[in-house]
Image (cartoon, rainbow, N blue to C red):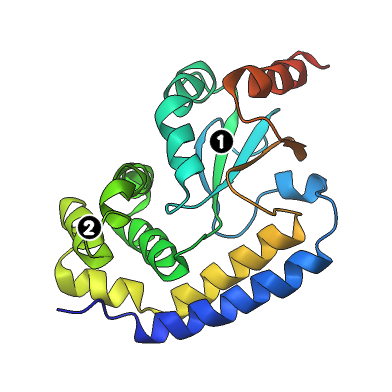
Amino acid sequence: MPFKYASMSRRAAVTGAALAAMTLLAGCSGNGAAAPAEGDMALGAPEGAKVTVVEYASVTCGHCAAWQNQVYPEFKAKYVDTNKVRYVFREFPTDPAPVAIAGFLMARCAGPDKYFPVIHEIMASQSEIFGGVPPRTVLLRIANGAGLTEQQFQDCVTDEDAIKAMDARIKAGISAGVTGTPWFMVNGEHVADSSLASLSEKIDAALAAS
């Protein structure tokens, strides 16, 4: 069965054009990027925490997958599991955009409790997605593992309202100054070096501030 992305592909094309155009107009990131946004997915401390770490990432971004594999476990143990920070994940699809968008939509359809595990599993499956296995086969397998039927998966990735909401989140990221992934902000300040040491320096300073 082909990967039925007809309506989604048209939306992805519009989104891609918007990305290209709006990136040229995007200003520097501001504190607004630290404020709660529609559709935010978060872990750790509750909203209004002293320190908020925002990551803009894509499930089809190799560097994002590497960070999730190499840095996230220690970052999560040190700051998220201890509720020292609020970790916010924001979706910012990269090429191939239809696959990234489908992955994000499917993760949301899996439900809040399964969102992050699904995101991480898609990232961990990039070698298959880019290695010749049809993306639909990979995503459907992950969807099934998360409790979604094939029909639920299909309905999910072609939901026009959900795709429009995704488009709005992408444009919000561009307006915040995001130009690539992964893109980290600590209390609204962009941290170019995503190593744990660099993030910890900013986070610990913010935690220690009066």
- Quadrant into which the C terminus falls: top right
Classify residue 125 as left or right of residue 47.
left
Q: Position of residue 103 (x, y in %)?
A: 36, 60
In the current view of this chain or complex, which residue is farthest to the top?
208
> How many other residues sit within 10 Å of disc 2, few (<14), some (14-19) or many (≥20)?
some
Can you say whether 164 is above or below 153 in the image? below
Labelled disc at residue 138? 2
Q: Amino acid at mark 1?
A: Tyr
Indicate the secondary structure of the residue bearing disc 1. Answer: strand
Q: Residue at x 74, y 35 (%)?
A: 187
**Residue 23 quadrant:** bottom right
Q: Earlier in the sequence, mark 1 or mark 2?
A: 1
Q: Position of residue 97 (x, y in %)?
A: 47, 67
Q: Foreground residue, 209 or 56?
A: 56
Q: Residue at x 47, y 75 (%)?
A: 163
> How many other residues sit within 10 Å of disc 1, few (<14), some (14-19) or many (≥20)?
many
Q: Amino acid at mark 2?
A: Val
Can you say whether 153 is above or below 49 in the image? below
Classify residue 13 as left or right of residue 138.
right
Q: Residue at x 63, y 78 (%)?
A: 17
Q: Residue at x 37, y 50 (%)?
A: 112
Q: Position of residue 45 (x, y in %)?
A: 56, 30
Labelled disc at residue 185? none
Q: Foreground residue, 28 or 40?
A: 28
Classify residue 53 as left or right of residue 6.
right
Labelled disc at residue 87? 1
